[in-house]
Every structure is written in C-alpha cells, then in structure tokens.
Amino acid sequence: MIKKITFSKTELIYLLSIISITLLTYLNHFDNPFFFDDVHTITQNESIKSLKNWPQFFTDAKTFSSLPANRAYRPMVTLKNAIDYAVAGKLDARYFHYHIFFWYIILIILVFQLCKKLYHASFKKYKHLSITALLATTWFALHTANAETINYICARSDSFSTLCIVAALLLYINSTTKKWFLHILAMIIGIWTKQTGLMFVPILFVYIILFEEDQIFNDFKKNAISSVINTLKKIAPVTIIGVSLFIFNQFYLTPSSTDSTNYTVTRFEYITTQFFVYKHYLSNFIFPINLSADPDIEIITPWYNLKILTGLLLILGMVYLMFKTAFQKKLRPISFGIAWFFIALLPTTLNPLYQIANDHRMFFPFIGLFIACSWGISILIDKYNLINKTTIFTLLFFLACHAFGTYNRNKIWDTKESLWLDVTVKSPRNGRGLMNYGLTQMEKGNLDNALNYFNRALKLTPNYSTLHINLGIAYGAKNNKQKAVNYFKRAIAENNTYGDAEYYYSRYLKEQKKYTEALKIASLGLQKNAENTRLQNLINELNVVKNQEINRLSKLEEEANTYPTVNLLIDLSSEYYSSKNYQKVIETCQRILEIDANNKIAYNNMCSAYNQLKKWKQGVKACKKAIEIDANFQLAKNNLKWAMDNVVN
C-alpha cells in the first residue's frame, strides 16, 4: 500500500503557478457560446430552468435533453446545467464555463497527486519524482487537445467523469478513505455523469496488479493465478456495484427512444476503423495541429487498408511496450498509463457510435499518456544525463507551444462562424460542417454564399434532414416558394423523431399567412415529439392568429352586409383570399362590380381566385378586363400571364 504523501511548500508554489498559467491560457474562452448538443441539453431544455426539478434528474432521463433520441441517463450533467442556469438567472454561457473550469482546476490538482503517488510507488527514491509529476500535470493542463473538451459545454460529461475516476483511484490508494469505500461513491458519481465512469473498474484492476499484487511479475507462472484471484477479490465490491448501476441506468432509466448507435456500418468495420482513429488521436497527442470540432473520418474498408494496418501496428507496438514495462518496477507508470489509454477508449471502440471519431473523446484516455510519457521522458533524461539548459529550454518551449495552441483553439471556438470555418478547412468532407458554416452566412444575410455551402453539403449528406430545413429557410428568404416547400417536405420525410422539420415548415407557412396549413403541420410535428416546446408555443401562436383572423373576417362580413362600400368589400375579398376561400373572393368581387363596374382591383382579385381554382379561361377574361381599365396595372399583367401559360398547357 502506498503511504500518505503530502505536498511540500515548493510543490504548492509550482502547482499554483501551473494553475495561474492555465487560467491565463484559457482567459479568452469564458465568453464562448453554446454549440452542438448544448442546444438540446441546455438552450432548448426546459428541465434545467428550475433547480426544483433536481429529483427528476435522477429518476427521469427525459430531463437530459429535449430530443427523444438523444436522451441519456446523465443526471449529474443535468444537475450542473441547472445549477449554472440558476446562478446566472438566464442562459448565459459564461457561468457554465466558470463552473467547468473550476472543476478543471480541481482535476489538475488531482492529476498531480495521482502522478506523484504512482511514481513514488514505482521508484520512491527517484530524485526527480516531484519535477516529473509537475511536468505531467503542466502538460495535461496546457495540452491543446484539451481545449476541445473545455470549450464544449456539453463535454463537461467527459471532463467531470474523468475527474471522478481520478478521484476514485486516489480515494482507493489512500488507506483511510478506502476503508470508508469513498472510492465507490466517486465511481457512482462518475457513472451518473457519463457511462464511461464504469471504466474505473478495469483501471483499478490494472493498478492493483501493477502496484499491489505485483509478485505476479517476479514469477509469472507461479503467481499469476493467485495474483489475479486476489485482485478480483479486491475489486469485487466495485465491480458488482458499478456493473449493477450501469445495467440499471442503461436498461431501466434510459428511454427506449435513446439511440446513438451507428446502424449504417457493421461492428467489424467500425472496430477496424478505430485502429486508424487511435492513430489520429495519438498524432494529436504528439502534435495537436489537426484538431477539428467535427472530424470527417469515415468508415475505412477493406480491413487490410494501409490506414487500418498502420494503426494496428501502432497499437501492437504500444501493447508490447505496456507488457514490457510491467516487468520492471520503476517503469510501471508507463505500463499503467498505456493501459489507461486503451481502457478509456474501449467504450467508443467496441460500441458503434454515429460519429466515428470525436476529438473531445481524447480527454479521458490522454490522462494515461500524460502519466506514461512524462515518466518515460524523465527516466530517459536521467539515464543519459541530459539534464541541462537545452533540455529545460526545449521542455519549456514545448509546453509554451501547447499554451499558445490552446489559446488559439479558444479563439476558434469564439464564434459559430470561426468554429465552422475551421471545420470546413480541417474536415472538408464533413457535410454537417459545411452546412453549419453556411448557416452562419445565412444569419449574416449572405444567402448566395450560404446556399453554396448548403449545396456542397448536400452532395455529401443527401439525406440530412437539418440540411433540408436550412435549404428551405434559405430559398424561402430568396422568395423561391416552390423550392422552399420542396425542401421542407423533404426534411419532414427524412426525420421521423424530433419535429424540428415540422416546426420550421409551419413557421414558414405562418409567414406566408397560411395559418390553417401551418397549424396542421405543427400538430403533426407535435405528434412525433410531444415535448417540443417550440412547436407547442407555435401552435398557441397560430391558434391566436387564426382566431383573430376568424374574428376579423366575421367583423368584415358583418360590416360589408351592413355598409357594403367598395373599399370594405375589397378588404373582405383579400381576407377570403388569405383563408383560401376562393369562391367567396369571386362572389365578393362580383358585389364590388355591381357598385363599381370599372373597378380594376375587383377584376384582378377575381383573376387570382380563378387561377387558384385552375379556371384559367375565366381568369384570363377577368385579368383582360382589369388591363382594359388600366393598361399599366402590372399585378394584373402578372396574373394574366399565369393564366395564359396554363391555358396553353
């Protein structure tokens, strides 16, 4: 058992310096906005708007997200979001970032303590032990890849569940807290934060084998069985509780509608592609210059593709190094760190997810690499007596580069436009990235540029419902009604879950004053997702408008019957036209002509109504009358052309 280790005054000073430098590095990220899954878990999630809902967070996974298919049982994440909303009193991303960064600082301290204890357990007399632990901690704190997790608010599930696992291991290592089984409590909180918290079980197994039941490495044949049995006994309480909680959460508390599984590929294709993903992650660990908020890595086939084989060789090399270093006590932190890396990636390796890779998934596994690589570098420097000004300058320059990289990644996450532009550059085959950058252009009013990116995305993701929604909105803004309607209908056909397509199509119809049709579409969307608050609000608005329209029409009818003036009857015909009662338009216009036989507006309105009823010849006749009265009446000319074109056909 590792004895209690305390921090010296010098270590505390260095640790405070690391935290201060980290704060300065991340100082430009606190006002970065919500992105990605933040929308349905935070900005559109009504559940987090009252802390009184907190008991439901632990009993009802529906509180996690406004989208049925994205509901996972992560009550700690929902609770944290609710706390941040309550403190801010509104949706303010800064308060979410403050809270996340606070726990990041705590994790930095815990990483230092874990490194120091692991290094002490393997080589307690090593003179550079504290410096090495500080190096690992600084590297972790400033590593550019971590910016992908710290900037992405919803990824607090990754950072906080990682903290829980590190804390759980430290609580197990400490003999006092171990007696009180506090490590199990930390693991439970980790699982409540993200399912990967269960990975504490295999990590604890590896720790015990390497640092407690390490007689297995003295005589493997003789001690292997007994060491493994002893280890299994030690982790039995953690395993039983952890696995039971995971199963209960996954199969009893997670809604059946929740599904992030990628059914478009086989499990074999997904897993073999992960060999390349490992290579991608490792390259970003060494040189994080290809970070993308939304990578465009796709399934690679066949399995003997060079990309897959290269990744496999890299993995096999790391596995060999892991076993090799396990047999040398002073090198066991390397073995432990590599094992941590592989264990942390197991959930996203074996379970086919919709996204093949995601850079915020690196946060948890990289902890192991910081432990292993820092120790390995330190041992090599000491072995070859390389401690000199050049080495120190190189290490400081290396860490400064990470700080600079992190600062710049924060700037990229500063706006939707800068983030998605970066994605289009780093991941040019990502349809969602192209669409989202196009969306930023549409918000600025650059419709042609937006449509350029939307159509580029359409070639890559032709069945993407959200893309069709945005195409509908863009063409609607350009007053291309036919294309707008076609894309909205395609969006509805491609999505049977969220109700978002119905919301935007209904909103468009409302803008066109087609209230009855809009209400019908919105109601269909609400049938798909009864908890879509935007649809509920839109339906309420449509009902109000429709009632106002009915009341206005009734009032106009009453007034027109009492005082049938020309202007009043023209207004009434327009109201009938808006409500698609075209026969009433014609009848009202005939009443106008009884009062004013040369009223051009009456003839034009009759023409429009006849056209809507596809009575083209009668439409031609009415419009010609309007133009006879006023040869410059452009609206009548347009309606006449509409009628004439169809008469010919």
Image: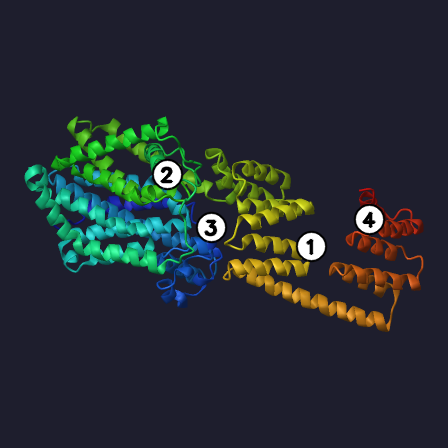
Q: Is residue 436 left or right of residue 247?
A: right
**Mark 3 is on which residue type?**
Phe
Rounded to the nearest whole Å, what is the CA distance between mark 3 and mark 1? Answer: 31 Å
**Can you say whether 292 is above or below 244 in the image?**
above
Mark earlier in primary sequence (3, 4): 3
Residue drawn at x 44%, y 40% is 294
Location of residue 455 by image quarter:
top right
Label 3 or label 1, whichever lies nearer to me, is 1
Q: Which residue position is annotated with label 2? A: 270
Q: Which residue position is annotated with label 1? A: 512
Rounded to the nearest whole Å, what is the CA distance between mark 1 and mark 4? Answer: 19 Å
Asked whether disc 3 touches disc 1, contact meaning CB atoms under 8 Å apart, the reply is no
| Viewer-proximal residue among 96 and 278 | 278
Rounded to the nearest whole Å, what is the CA distance between mark 4 and mark 2? Answer: 57 Å
Label 3 or label 2, whichever lies nearer to me, is 2
Label 1 or label 4, whichever lies nearer to me, is 4
Mark earlier in primary sequence (1, 2): 2
Asked whether disc 1 touches disc 2, contact meaning CB atoms under 8 Å apart, the reply is no
Location of residue 377 by image quarter:
top left
Label 3 or label 4, whichever lies nearer to me, is 4
Rounded to the nearest whole Å, what is the CA distance between mark 3 and mark 2? Answer: 30 Å
Q: Which element carries disc 2, helix, strand or loop?
A: helix
User: Label for residue 639?
Assistant: 4
